Amino acid sequence: MISIYDAQIVFLPFSRNPFIKYDDDLKIALLLKKYLAKKENLKIIKSTLDPSDMKGIIRESDLLIGERYHSVVFAFSEKTPTIALSYDVKVDEFCKRYGIQLLNVHEFTAEALNRLLSSLGFKFERRY
């Protein structure tokens, strides 16, 4: 996706629990970065931001791909196009209620994401 769209990705950690394996988003972001061919296109926010700052970043984004419930809620409140990575009933119900696209986290692949973006006719537009 990064190479196809020359996307600039901003990773916003929403959860930072170092005691639960997959509940520390910063660790997940650093792991993700290992797999990217264009590492310079990924910006990881390492500092703790307050919700209004997170919403501001989301507001200025072309698209949010979110796994955390609050990232999806923030994107909805800021009218940012969203693809939610479905993992939990509360995410599914929120997305179904408001017409937000879902992609099951267990079926997530680059190909699945590209198919979804293509089916939506999503176009990235530079804002600068």
Image (cartoon, helix red, strand yellow):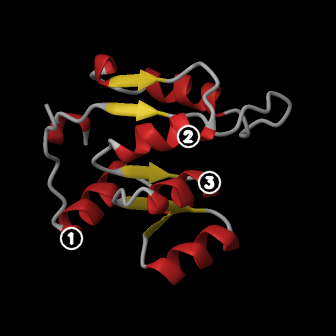
Residue 68 seen in this snapshot: no
In the displayed structure image, the side of residue 94 where residue 121 appears, left or right: left
Quarter of the image where one finds residue 50: top right
Kind of residue at badge 1: Ser
The one nearer the camera, 9 or 48, is 48
Kind of residue at badge 3: His
In the displayed structure image, the side of residue 60 where residue 19 appears, left or right: right
**Rendered image: mark on residue 56:** none
The one nearer the camera, 61 or 10, is 61
Q: Residue at x 26, y 56 (%)?
A: 114
CA distance separating discs 1 and 3: 25 Å
Residue sitting farthest toward the bottom: 97
User: Residues at badges 1 and 2 in contact (C-beta under 8 Å)?
Assistant: no
The one nearer the camera, 70 or 21, is 70
Determine which residue is flagged by label 2: 52
Residue 63: x, y in percent?
32, 51
Q: Earlier in the sequence, mark 1 or mark 3?
A: 3
The one nearer the camera, 43 or 116, is 43
Q: Image height check: is 50 above or below 58? A: above
Q: Residue at x 61, y 68 (%)?
A: 91
CA distance separating discs 1 and 2: 32 Å
Residue 108 seen in this snapshot: yes
Kind of residue at badge 2: Ser
Disc 1 secondary structure class: helix
In the displayed structure image, the side of residue 95 where residue 22 appears, left or right: right
**Rendered image: mark on residue 119:** 1
Determine which residue is flagged by label 3: 70
Residue sitting farthest toward the right: 19
Q: Image height check: is 103 above or below 51? A: below
Q: Earlier in the sequence, mark 1 or mark 2?
A: 2
Mark 1, other Cα within 10 Å: few <14 / some 14–19 / many ≥20: few
Q: Residue at x 59, y 34 (%)?
A: 13
